[in-house]
Image (spheres, rainbow, N blue to C red):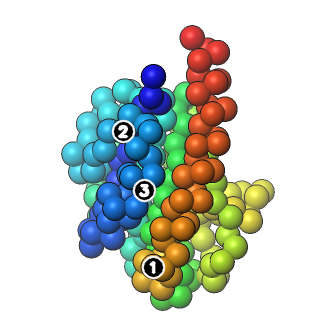
Amino acid sequence: MKTRIKIIYGSDTGNTEHVLTDVLTPLLEEFDLEVKTVAEISPEDWATHDVYIIGVPTWYFGDLQSDWDDYFEEFKKIDFSGKHVAFFGLGDQFGYDEWFIDGVGILAKALINNGGKTFAHWPIEGYEFTESKALIPGKEDHFFGLAIDEDNQYEQTEDRCTQWVNILKKDLQSIVASLAAQV
């Protein structure tokens, strides 16, 4: 049986949707995927799966993408106990170097505060930024999730996605085994 993963994302310019649709989804074809935009989800969407992937671009000075921003107050109230979430985020490390992929960190910290677990963390090597809320506390050499810079390093997107999916698959083996043992 294929592992079920729900992907929830937001995209204003289409870059996050492009990365998901054209790069990540083909790499994840071995999984049973359900994809929704954050604008179309309901509270029940957080109850249907144990494993999620969240896609979020960061806007301007560390702001959430508009649909995630609209949904954030509700997101902060969800009980994520037993949920495992991988993040991918888009940002501009040169134009907004003090807020690089902050959206990932904002959502990840709310998720963790409500009992969720993150996985498929991503190293900071190869990026130039000043600060980021997406850095894992106590493990600042990793982001909570994959960092994509379509503005300045678009030529690295496909390779980074491939490497991240390999990390995700490895982490999922442990998660699936843990979930199966709970049944």
Q: 152 left or right of 167? A: left
The extreme bottom residue here reads 95
Whole-angstrom CA distance, mark 1 to mark 3, is 14 Å
Identity of the residue drawn at 27% across and 73% down:
13
Q: Are marks 1 and 3 in contact (CB under 8 Å)?
A: no
Q: Is residue 17 above or below residue 9?
A: below
Q: 126 left or right of 161? A: right
Q: Earlier in the sequence, mark 2 or mark 3?
A: 3
Residue at mark 1: 154
Q: Position of residue 115 (x, y in %)?
A: 57, 34
Q: 80 left or right of 66? A: right
The extreme top residue here reads 183
**SS category of the residue bearing label 2:** strand
Residue at mark 2: 33
**SS category of the residue bearing label 1:** helix
Q: Is residue 166 above or below residue 134?
A: above
The extreme right residue here reads 138
As drawn, the label of residue 24 is 3
As drawn, the label of residue 69 is none
The extreme left residue here reads 40
Identity of the residue drawn at 68% across and 64% down:
123
Q: Earlier in the sequence, mark 1 or mark 3?
A: 3
The answer to which quarter of the image holds residue 135 is bottom right
Q: Position of residue 164 (x, y in %)?
A: 57, 57
Identity of the residue drawn at 48% across and 35% down:
51
Front position in the image: 10 or 34 = 34
Q: Position of residue 139 (x, y in %)?
A: 76, 58
**SS category of the residue bearing label 3:** helix
Q: Can residue 44 be seen from the camera position used here?
A: yes
